[in-house]
Image: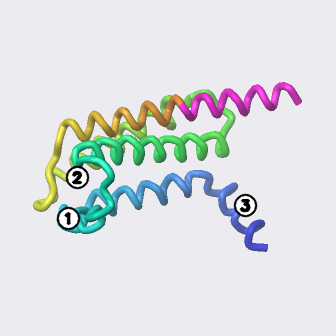
């Protein structure tokens, strides 16, 4: 029963998972640095700088993949750059600008570069998944 309701909800609102991820990103980007340090304390396998780079890349790679998969569910159109790549990149810019406004966070250009790398990485993976789905459909 729950599965059917969830499927119906996602059919009506296919971008709901992307909105959920965007909300989690917003909360994460809004945390004070001290709170982030508490979360990382004792769990950092690499240097703080390397962990920060990996975090930015992976988070935006995941966000772009979720956005892309929502796009596949929502439409059969071909404006994938307009509905996936540009919004994911824009959200990365918005999150960095949001940090510039917060008194306890700072805007960093290198973070924007890492966000963008994650977006492009996620977009490439999304295109590979989309291509695989298309070839699977054509073979059946």
Quadrant of residue 33 in the image? Answer: bottom left
Q: List the residue tagged with mark 2.
A: 98
The segment highlighted magenta reads 125-140
SS state under label 2: helix
How would you rate the neighbour count of disc 3 (Cα within 10 Å): few for under 14, some for 14-19, many for 20 or more?
A: few
Q: Which quadrant of the rendered structure holds the C terminus?
A: top right
Q: Are marks 3 and 2 in contact (CB under 8 Å)?
A: no
The residue sitting at 52% across, 29% down in the picture is 124
- Residue 7: give its label: 3
Task: Name the one closer to the observer, 45 or 37.
Answer: 45
Comparing labels 3 and 1, the label whose residue is closer to the camera: 1
How would you rate the neighbour count of disc 1 (Cα within 10 Å): few for under 14, some for 14-19, many for 20 or more?
A: some
| Sequence-earlier tag: 2 or 1 | 1
Q: Are marks 2 and 1 in contact (CB under 8 Å)?
A: no
Residue 11 spot, x, y in % from top left: 69, 55
Q: List the residue tagged with mark 1.
A: 32
Quadrant of residue 75 in the image? Answer: top right
Quadrant of residue 132 in the image? Answer: top right
Classify residue 18 as left or right of residue 13. Answer: left
Q: Is residue 127 above or below residue 91?
A: above
Q: Is residue 138 magenta?
A: yes
| Sequence-earlier tag: 3 or 2 | 3
Classify residue 95 as left or right of residue 105. Answer: right
Q: Is residue 30 above or below residue 83?
A: below
Classify residue 57 as left or right of residue 17. Answer: left
């Amino acid at each position: 029963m729950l599965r059917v309701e969830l499927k119906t909800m996602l059919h009506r609102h296919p971008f709901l998972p992307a909105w959920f991820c965007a909300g989690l990103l917003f909360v994460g980007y809004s945390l004070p640095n001290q709170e982030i340090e508490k979360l990382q304390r004792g769990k950092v396998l690499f240097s703080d700088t390397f962990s920060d780079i990996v975090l930015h890349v992976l988070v935006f790679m995941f966000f772009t993949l979720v956005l892309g998969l929502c796009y596949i569910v929502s439409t059969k159109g071909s404006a994938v750059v307009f509905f996936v790549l540009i919004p994911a990149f824009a959200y990365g810019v918005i999150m960095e600008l949001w940090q510039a406004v917060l008194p306890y966070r700072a805007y960093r250009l290198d973070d924007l570069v890492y966000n963008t790398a994650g977006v492009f990485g996620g977009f490439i993976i999304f295109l590979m998944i989309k291509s695989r789905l298309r070839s699977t459909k054509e073979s059946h």
